[in-house]
Image (cartoon, rainbow, N blue to C red):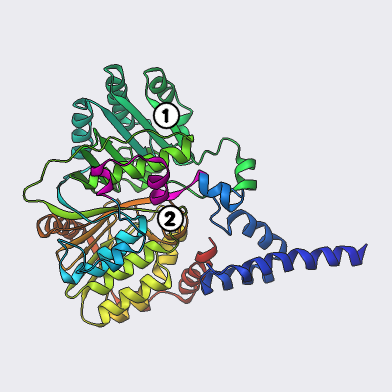
Amino acid sequence: MTWLLLLLHVLLIAAFTLRILLRDDLRPDVRMGWLTVMVLLPYAGCALYYLFGEAALGRLGSDRQHKRYPGVRAFVQQYVALPEVAAQLMAPHPAAPVRQPGGVPAVDAQWQAAFRYASSVNGFRVTTGNSARLMADGAQARAQMLADMDAARHEIHLLYYIWLTDGTGTGIAQALMRAARRGVACRVMVDGLGSRALTRSPLWRQMAEAGVELAVALPVDHPLKVVLTSRIDLRNHRKITVIDGTIAYCGSQNCADEAFAVKARYAPWVDIMLRLQGPVVSQMQLIFASDWLQATGKTFAPRMPVAPAQTPGFTALAIAEGPAERRRSTPQLVSTLLASARRELVISTPYFIPDATVLEALCAAAWRGVETTLILPARNDSWIVGAASRSNYRRLLAAGVRILEYRPGLLHAKTLCVDGEVTLLGSTNLDLRSFDLNFENNVLLQDTALTAAIRARQQAYAQQSDTITAEQVRAWSWTTRIWHNLLATLSPVL
C-alpha cells in the first residue's frame, strides 16, 4: 500500500509538472511560480493549478470551445452578414493592419506602431470621424445615459461587470423597462459573479417581465460545475453601453452609485466615462454582439447605421481583450504605447500589478527622459493588490517615475495619456487579472483636445494625491518590505 501511494503521489506531481512545462504560453515567472508551489505544497499546488492555473473557457476541447467562444474577429466572420458599412470596420486579413502600405491613414507617424498593433488584436480598422464628450463625473454620466436611453428609438445594449440595485442600477433598469414597453429592443448582459445579487433580485425579474432580454456572462449558479469545467475567477469585466447603434459609453464606471454600497468603506468610487459617437460605436456594437453569443448561444443583427460625419472628428478604434482573443495583447499594446512616448506619460489605475513587459517599459520611458506619472489609490479595496503594487515602488522611483497616491476615495479610472495626443481608456487595469483573465474593452484614440480634457482630469486626481518619495520607501520596515515582495512573488499565481 505504501508503494502504491508513493507511485500515485509521483504520478500526480509529475503530471501537473509536465503540463506546466509543456505550456508554451506561460511566462517564465509564472511557470517558476507554479513549479515552486508544486514543490512546497504538492497536493494544494495541484488543486490550485487545476482550479486557477489556466484561463479555460470550459475544459471542453479546443474545437468546441472555439465555436462557443469565437472571439470578436471570428464572430464577425462566422455570424455577421456584413453590409458594406460594417465591412469597412474590419481588416480583410489578420496581417493586413501591420502590412498596410503607407501606414494607417489619419494616424501621425509617432503613433503608427501603436495603432497598427491595436488594429491587429480584433481586426478592427482604425476609424475616423469620431467625436466624444468627457463626462464631468458619475452623476453626469448617469443623467446623460438615462436621457439617451429615454430618447432611444430602436435598441439599447448594456453590458456591465457590476450592476447594483442602488439608485444608479435601479434608475437604469427603469429606463430600460420604459424603453422596452414602447417597443425598443433592449438587451442586458451582466457578469455572473460581479452582478450575482442583481440576477437574484426582484429588479432582474421586473426587467424580464417588461420585455428586456437578459443574459448572464460566465454564470456561477452551479459553482462545483464551474470549478470542474472552467475557472470561477474568469470574469467579463467589460463596461459597454450602445444606444441605437449611434451612441456608446466607454470607461471604468460600473452600473452603480459612487457610494458603491458593497464596498462603502472605500467610497467614493472615482470613475471616468466617455460618450462616443461615430464609426467606433459600431465596433463597440460588434463586441457586445460577440459577448451576447457567448452568454446565450444566440445571435442578432447588430444595428450599425452609417454614422454622420463628425466635424472635426478624431481617429479611434475599439479594442476587446480577453481569453477569447490573442493572449498577451494587453501588455503588448500598453508597452507599445509607452515606447512611443517622447515627452510625457500619465497613467491612472486602481490595480497595479504589471508583468515584466509593462514594468520594464515604464522604467525605460522614465530613464530616457519621458516625464512619467503613475496615479494609484492610497487605500485599495484589495489588500493583496495594494501590497503587491508597492513592491514595485523602489524600482520605479529609481528610474524617475513620479508615484502619486490618491486620497479622497478609490480612484477607479483607468487612463493612459501619451504626449498630450493619444489616450487609451476603458475597463482594463494594469494588473495580471486584466492581462490574462478578464474580458475587457477599451478605446484607443488620437485627439489633442480630448486628450487635454482627460489630462486635466488626471491633473485633478494628482492635486488630491500624496507624492511618494524614495525616502519614504526606504523608511519602510524590513517586515513591510518582505510582505510586499512576498505578495508580488505570488502575484503571477494569485
Within 10 Å of disc 1 (Cα), the crowding (few <14, some 14-19, many 20+) is some
Query: Image quarter for residue 161?
Result: top left
Tell me if 216 is positioned left or right of 301 in this view.
right
Name which residue type carries label 1: Leu
The answer to whether residue 365 of the structure is visible from this angle is yes
- Considering depth in this image, is 170 or 237 the residue closer to the camera? 237
Circles 1 and 2 in contact, beta carbons < 8 Å: no
- Number of the front mark, 1 or 2: 2
x then y, percent, for residue 159: 36, 39
x then y, percent, for residue 68: 51, 43
Q: For the residue labelled by badge 2, is the local secondary structure a helix, a strand or a loop?
A: loop
Name which residue type carries label 2: Glu
Task: Based on the picture, tell me whether residue 173 belongs to the magenta stretch.
Answer: no
x then y, percent, for residue 146: 22, 30
Q: Is residue 217 above or below residue 180?
A: below
Q: For the residue labelled by badge 1, is the local secondary structure a helix, a strand or a loop?
A: strand
Residue 325 is marked as 2
Magenta region: 68-89
